[in-house]
Amino acid sequence: MLDLVIRGSLILVFAFAAAGLMRRASAAARHLLWASTLAGLLVLPAAVRLGPSVQVPVPMLAASAAPAAPALAPVADLGPTSDFAPVGPPRARVRSHTRAHVRAHVATHVSAAPSATASIVGPSAADDMAPDPALAPMSAGVERAGVTPTAVRERAHTRSVVRSIWQIRWQIWAAGVLIVLGRLLVGMARVRAIVRDAAPVTAPEWLLLLRSVAYPLGVRRRVRLRMGPAGAVPVTCGIIAPVIILPEDAEDWDDERRTLVLTHELAHVRRLDVLTHIMGQLAVAVFWFHPLAWVAAARMRLERERACDDLVLVAGARPSRYAGDLLDLVQTLTGATAPAAAALAMARRTEIEGRLLSILDAAVRRGPLGARRIAGALAVVGMGVVTIAAVHPVPLAPQDPAIVVLPAVSALAQVPMVAPALARATTFVRVGGYANYAALADIAAAAATIASDAAKRQVLFEIGQRYGASDTLRHAFFATTNTMASSSERRRVLLALIGTGSRDKQTLIEVVRSAATIASDHDKGTVLRTVAGLDPLTDPALRHEFFAAVATLASSSERTRVLLAVLGEARARGHDNPDGNAVIAQLALSAATKLPSSSDKVRVLRAVVHGGWLNDATVAKDFNICLSTLGSGLDYHYVVSGGGD
């Protein structure tokens, strides 16, 4: 059980650290983080038991598992022991010392009142309980060490209590699980009773409004609408057959408030919030003893409501009106709210202040998450949970001192031999002020035969420091660079080469071509974003190669990051090259049209809007083409309404 607690704590600590880094992310992204974290806690016991197991040697465990030294401190340290020489294991010696001390202590207290002792147990018994002279030195030594009989008894009692509790730890855990699950089941029963007692809404204006709000949100499921008692807040419940329960006084609301409330509740249906809520409650039931699990569940509940608030605002609601209606619903709350463990209430007094501040803050990032981003986040969290569940620390196996391990001979040994050649190539061998690039090209070509990408990178680093505008050197340098199979090593070489920011156009073209063949989208995107920051892409050949490399990015998010970086640099240099920036905006829109994620398309479209390039007729045409590919009416409205990114 302790092992499970440690693994669960690691997951929660990582989640809280990630949440700290995501303070500026949207509420939907933070809700996804907490929901996936609680899902990971829920499957952690099964993953530990049924998943793969990887044994990781830990030196600290080896030190703790090492056998104790055969000799301990001498007993004489506790006091003079003239005739006492105990034998046996060290723990037996300690127990014998303690028993001897207790006997001496009891005997001393008995001898302090001889008359009382004699009257109770008789003279012979009192004589038998007299202090043993042979044990007096031992007692004095233990007293000097700070060990008293009371402390011994208290420690023994504490150990006994802890041992007893530890023996029934699983029974205690099961009892806690039953209590939390019982709370959930009772709440579900209460919600079911509320739904049963609520009257179905059959008014045509309500049903028509429900359908008109559900369609733009992408809700295609059948949602039942019921009317509950007055003075309550709107509630959504049900996983398979969702139900929205409105208070009786909803009949007095105007059309705008009705639309806002239904949008918020249907946002819960679209996001499957009831499912994630029940899943979080089950995770809390399993880890009921962990305070961070309860905090994570509370954070998920708060971010869930904020994410639905964001969808309401993205749908076109005025923040001031929506905040006022939300506050009015809380202030007029007189009836009993649905149980928090089993239903999703639109507003609760304990969390209304933070939601109102978020609604009225224009700088908050809003908008839904795309399917690819959700799948990617779940995959990352899933891999993290599997990794934490699979790692099993084991003591490091001690090495036999008689075995000598010789250092391995690798391709790195070739690097020192290259340094003298590099020096000879650039010291005195200069013709007309130019370095001997032919010698550097020969070294670069020879480096292609090095097996290790790390060693190859070291050689190319040295050549890059002496790099110049030479066709021969450029051809040899990039021919060797393109033989590197490691994406990260090739990225480091390319970034080091263009790090000075003073490279010629042909070199930048070769850098982009080499980046296009990098396997990792992350490393490829890093190189392309760096090139975009160093060069305005005014050269047609470089611009063509750049966007051709962008098209090779399989990751929608990485491609979007590169396009946003290009548009951001073009916007910053807007007055220097307006015609060239319009061409860049056209190419970015053409690339964004092919993005699989609608949310990523929205970000690129918003960047074009902020860049002010829609005055160009060609840019406006490509903008409308990309805009027409948005699959969701909500995303379309988000772009044309001027929402922030």
Image (tube, rainbow, N blue to C red):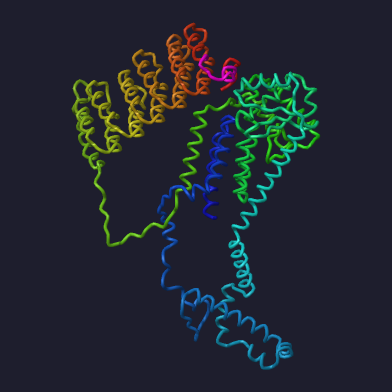
Is residue 303 at least partly visible in the picture?
A: no
Residue most extreme to the bottom: 124
Q: On the rendered structure, is 589 left or right of 102?
A: left
Residue 615: x and y in percent read: 52, 7
Is residue 645 at least partly visible in the picture?
A: yes
Viewer-closest of 572 and 253: 253
Task: Say whether residue 632 is magenta.
Answer: yes
Q: On the rendered structure, is 122 left or right of 477?
A: right
Identify the residue at horizontal 80%, vertical 32% (top origin).
229
Q: Quadrant of the C terminus?
A: top right
Q: On the rendered structure, is 516 left or right of 404?
A: right
Task: Say whether residue 393 is magenta.
Answer: no
Residue 200 sits above or below residue 286 on the image: above
In the image, the segment drawn in magenta is 627-637
Residue 378 sits above or below residue 596 on the image: below
Q: Quadrant of the N terminus?
A: bottom right
Q: On the rendered structure, is 527 left or right of 326?
A: left
